[in-house]
Image (cartoon, grey):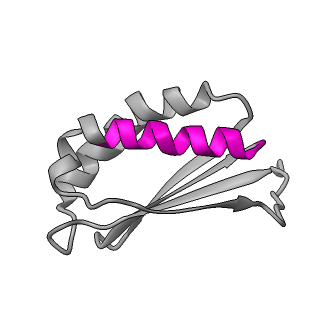
Amino acid sequence: MFATIRRYKPKSGTFDKKAIDGLKGRIESSFVPTIQEIPGFHCYYVLNVGGKELISIGLFEDKTGATESTRRAAEFVKKDPIKDQIGSPEIHEGDLLVAKESAIATR
């Protein structure tokens, strides 16, 4: 399995809550469906780190899928209204060495 992590920082030092709320909706409705189409897609998460950075984490079966998700993310940001507030991402890709998920328990 292969992971990609992208860290986005705002040009102004912090993200506006209203801008983040709007971006969240656009990610869910527009970006996520496009990466779900990538062969080998496993999951995608986005973290808001106190308004000071956004971190996305994507898991794919192989490097090809992870690289394609980064290409699609750049395309998405380039067209998104937040493009003027967000800096270029710091991108990390690599083999996922350990992955463990909890089984969903029924109680």
| Magenta stretch secondary structure, dominant | helix
At a point 30% along the width and 73% down the height, the residue shown is 52
Q: Position of residue 49 (x, y in %)?
A: 39, 71
Is 36 left or right of 87, judged from the image as shown? right
Q: Position of residue 61 (x, y in %)?
A: 78, 42
Q: Is residue 68 above or below residue 38?
A: below
Q: Residue 72 magenta-drawn?
A: yes
> Residue 95 lies in what quarter of the image?
bottom right
At a point 27% along the width and 49% down the height, the residue shown is 21
Is 57 left or right of 29, judged from the image as shown? right
At a point 54% along the width and 52% down the height, the residue shown is 45
In the image, the segment drawn in magenta is 61-77
At a point 49% along the width and 34% down the height, the residue shown is 32
Q: Exactly how many numbered labels are in the figure?
A: 0
Q: Residue 81 magenta-drawn?
A: no
Looking at the image, which is closer to me, 83 or 52? 83
Is 21 left or right of 70, judged from the image as shown? left
Looking at the image, which is closer to me, 52 or 64? 64
Q: Position of residue 105 (x, y in %)?
A: 83, 52
Q: Position of residue 43 (x, y in %)?
A: 65, 44
> Residue 12 lies in what quarter of the image?
bottom left
> Residue 4 lies in what quarter of the image?
bottom right
Is 1 left or right of 56, judged from the image as shown? right
Q: Is residue 99 above or below residue 51?
A: above
